[in-house]
Amino acid sequence: MDYTEKISHLAGLIKKSSYTLALTGAGISTESGIPDFRSPGTGLWTKFDPVKVATVSALKRDPAAFYEINLDRWTRFTGVEPNAAHYVLARLEREGLLRGVITQNIDGLHSKAGTKQLWEAHGHLRTCRCMDCEQRYPLDFLVNQFNKGTNPPLCENCGGVLRLDVVLFEDPLGEDFTGAVHAMDKCRLLIVVGSSLTVYPVAALPERAAQLAIVNKEPTPWDDRAAVVINEMAGRVLTDVLAALGKI
Ligand code: APR
Ligand code: ZN
């Protein structure tokens, strides 16, 4: 199948499916200017070893170093806007053609684009919490302390060290992931957008879908089980799918 045939094939799968979900990764946000993790040459993990820098043990071992290394990459992109791919997924949901989005991203761009049903499997950047008394604060409470030189940022309740509400390596996945697993049990078509599908347990979710479609620049380990694989930019593909559905 050539590109146009793949687009109409994916549009046909969406029309026929009674319960469609999208599963997105960092690749859906690169066109908004946020680098992903594993793209050859530009991905973040091609420069850092995630296991050394983004784990719970790294945070507990040396919280000040943890924030020196990580905080900037988490806060640098707050002013970023959704791109066409995010907006198309929100539009498909409004048209009743998509039930919701399971995302590994913490950038908040799906909500900003208008997606209502969203499962943030790897957490988000809206709040932080104390590792001792669990008191929650808006993320700014942590960032402002750091910017004024208090590193590691501390709880004003008990003086404990604060951590973000993102899922780090070694963290258990939270209730959003549990919700995503339940939604997957009803899923007839899963559309993966911009993920290398290499980080478990999210990378096991495609197992639960009756049918799989993959929109990703690079190959993924699930390609041979997908009904259609489109190795093109997500913004272009999803816009063309929306047009093929007669919604533009
Ligand atoms: N359009 C389509 N695909 C793209 C685009 C784009 N514009 N830009 C990048 N990609 C593809 C890349 O080819 C890559 O295969 O998106 C994929 C992104 O994969 P990763 O960088 O591994 O990101 P992701 O799958 O989200 O990583 C999962 O790993 O480090 C952890 O917690 C982090 O949530 C993240 C998890
Ligand atoms: Zn506390």
Image (tube, grey):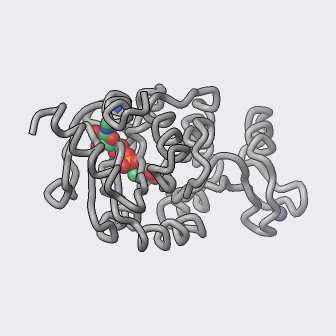
**Between 48 and 29, which is closer to the camera in this rendering?**
29
The number of discs equals: 0
Quadrant of the rendering where the N terminus is positioned:
top left
Q: Where is residue 188 in the image (x, y as percent from the top left)?
A: 35, 64
Q: In this view, does 82 lie above or below 152?
A: above
Occupied quadrant, residue 186 = bottom left
Q: Position of residue 136 (x, y in %)?
A: 80, 58
Q: Is residue 46 above or below residue 41?
A: below
Q: Position of residue 126 (x, y in %)?
A: 70, 47
Residue occupying the point 51% across, 34% down: 87
Residue occupying the point 73% across, 39% down: 143
Residue 51 is left or right of residue 91, and the answer is left
Residue occupying the point 76% across, 48% down: 153
The answer to whether residue 234 of the structure is visible from this angle is yes
Residue 232 is left or right of residue 90, and the answer is left
Occupied quadrant, residue 235 = top left
Q: Position of residue 150 (x, y in %)?
A: 78, 41
| Ligand 1, image quadrant it occupies | top left
The answer to whether residue 49 of the structure is visible from this angle is no
**Between 175 and 43, which is closer to the camera in this rendering?**
175
Q: In this view, does 104 lie above or below 112?
A: below
Residue 58 is left or right of residue 191, and the answer is right
Residue occupying the point 32% across, 63% down: 206
Q: Residue furthest right?
A: 157
Quadrant of the rendering where the C terminus is positioned:
top left
